[in-house]
Image: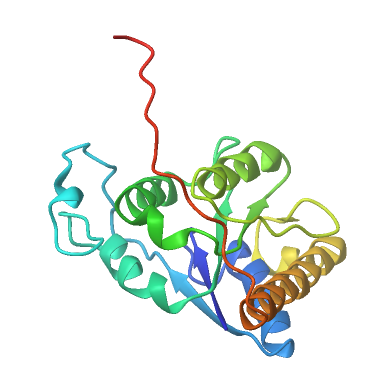
Amino acid sequence: MKVLLVNGSPHAQGCTYTALAEVASELEKQGVGAEIFQLGTKPISGCLACGGCRRTVGPRCVMDDKVNEALALVPEFDGFILGSPVYYASISGQLSCFLDRLFFAGGALFANKPGAAVVSCRRGGAATAFDDLNKYFTISNMPIVSSIYWNQVHGSRADDVKQDLEGLQTMRQLGRNMAWMLKCIEAGKAAGVAMPELEPRIWTNFIR
């Protein structure tokens, strides 16, 4: 079992990374593999609504960047944690563009795989950014993993986050809860419990 943790901050080892690293450490203690996927600092385009991903071979975007790199990894992982700094009470623009294209091109790959959101802020705006991330899970048929508090840490620098003891505890519990859910899903499969059946999608347009 493996979990992919996406660091949506341009800072490779900043506040968001520090929170995700705490989760990753706990996952590995629980016997679950963890890998942090760094978006980096190169620009990531938003979705152009071109429909090109519907014509590619396999889940793939026509713009070849970090999105396709992540799409190639998704089938290997059993759970996903999305981490973002808080910018103007929302997630980073880079991560927003990345996730829009990732889930539009490959949303079916995430079905029935647990997801969790992690946000890092200096002071405020965490709740709305947290909500932004969770919407990707709830439209993709993904169970959401929670913790003892909303999954957030506070600080302007990585050293500040290391002093947020409640935030770090929340991250550790998130790691334990994610590991527990993955093990429960694995045990269910071994016991012959079928995954939920998906009906063919029904599209209802309000303007006809």
Using residue 129 as the reference point, say whether residue 98 is left or right of it.
left
Image point (42%, 79%), residue name: 76
x and y, in percent, of residue 14 in the image:
57, 66
x and y, in percent, of residue 140 in the image:
49, 49
Quadrant in which residue 73 is drawn: bottom left
Image point (45%, 45%), residue name: 199
Q: Is residue 163 above or below residue 207?
A: below
Which quadrant would the N terminus be assigned to in this image?
bottom right
Q: Is residue 118 above or below residue 203?
A: below
Quadrant in which residue 49 is drawn: top left
Out of 66 and 192, give the one closest to the viewer: 192
Q: Is residue 17 above or below residue 204?
A: below
Name the colouring of the figure: rainbow
Using residue 26 as the reference point, say whether residue 2 is left or right of it.
left
Image point (27%, 42%), residue name: 47
Out of 64 and 199, give the one closest to the viewer: 199
Report the residue that reaches farthest toward the front: 192
Out of 132 and 167, give the one closest to the viewer: 132
x and y, in percent, of residue 82 in the image:
55, 59
Image point (15%, 54%), residue name: 62
x and y, in percent, of residue 103 in the image:
39, 51
Question: For the image shown, how many numbered marks are present on the structure?
Answer: 0
Which quadrant would the C terminus be assigned to in this image?
top left
Using residue 6 as the reference point, say whether residue 94 is left or right of it.
left
